[in-house]
Image (tube, rainbow, N blue to C red):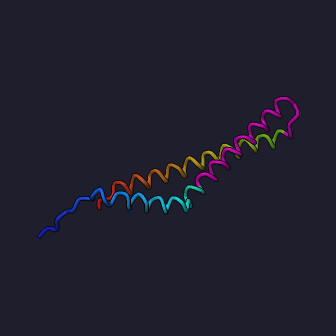
Amino acid sequence: MSSPITPVGADRIPLVIEALGERRRSGGFERVLQETIRQVEDYRQSADKSVEAQLVGQGEELHQTILATQRAELAFELFLQVRNKVVQAYQEIMRMQM
């Protein structure tokens, strides 16, 4: 005997949306993501300022400019790799059969 499949009614959709909204308000993942994006952007801006200062002759020593640039590049690449893993995990979850 097979069990009947019941459709998701329109009366349940607002409850699901409300439950998702409750979780979103806590903002754990969203807050971490926003903070990470802000930090990567800060590294990039710092590297840009350091390079500009170096070009006009008002900068720090050359190795500090290079370090700032490398820090910004590594932070961005790490962020991209984490993003790729999150997207990959999401896609894997979406492929799961229920």
Q: Is residue 62 magenta?
A: no
Question: In percent of the image, x 81 and y 42: which residue is there?
Answer: 63
Question: In percent of the image, x 86 and y 40: which residue is there?
Answer: 60
User: On the rendered structure, is 13 left or right of 20?
Assistant: left
Q: How many marks?
A: 0
User: On the rendered structure, is 29 left or right of 16?
Assistant: right
User: On the rendered structure, is 45 left or right of 29?
Assistant: right
**What secondary structure do most residues of the magenta stretch adopt?**
helix
In the image shown, does 43 or 27 lie closer to the viewer? 27
User: On the rendered structure, is 34 left or right of 87?
Assistant: right
In the image shown, does 9 or 48 lie closer to the viewer? 9
- Displayed quadrant of residue 69: top right
On-image quarter of the C terminus: bottom left
Magenta residue span: 33-61
Q: Residue furthest top?
A: 56
Q: Is residue 39 magenta?
A: yes
Q: Residue furthest front?
A: 11
In the image shown, does 37 or 51 lie closer to the viewer? 37
**Where does the image place residue 65, in percent across and percent down from the top left?**
79, 40
Q: Residue furthest right?
A: 58
Q: Residue furthest bottom?
A: 1
| Residue 81 versus residue 1 in the image, above or below | above
Question: In percent of the image, x 34 and y 54: which residue is there?
Answer: 95
On-image quarter of the N terminus: bottom left
Question: In percent of the image, x 54 and y 60: which residue is there?
Answer: 25
**Where does the image place residue 44, in percent across and percent down from the top left?**
70, 41
| Residue 58 versus residue 7 in the image, above or below | above
**Where does the image place residue 49, in percent across and percent down from the top left?**
78, 37
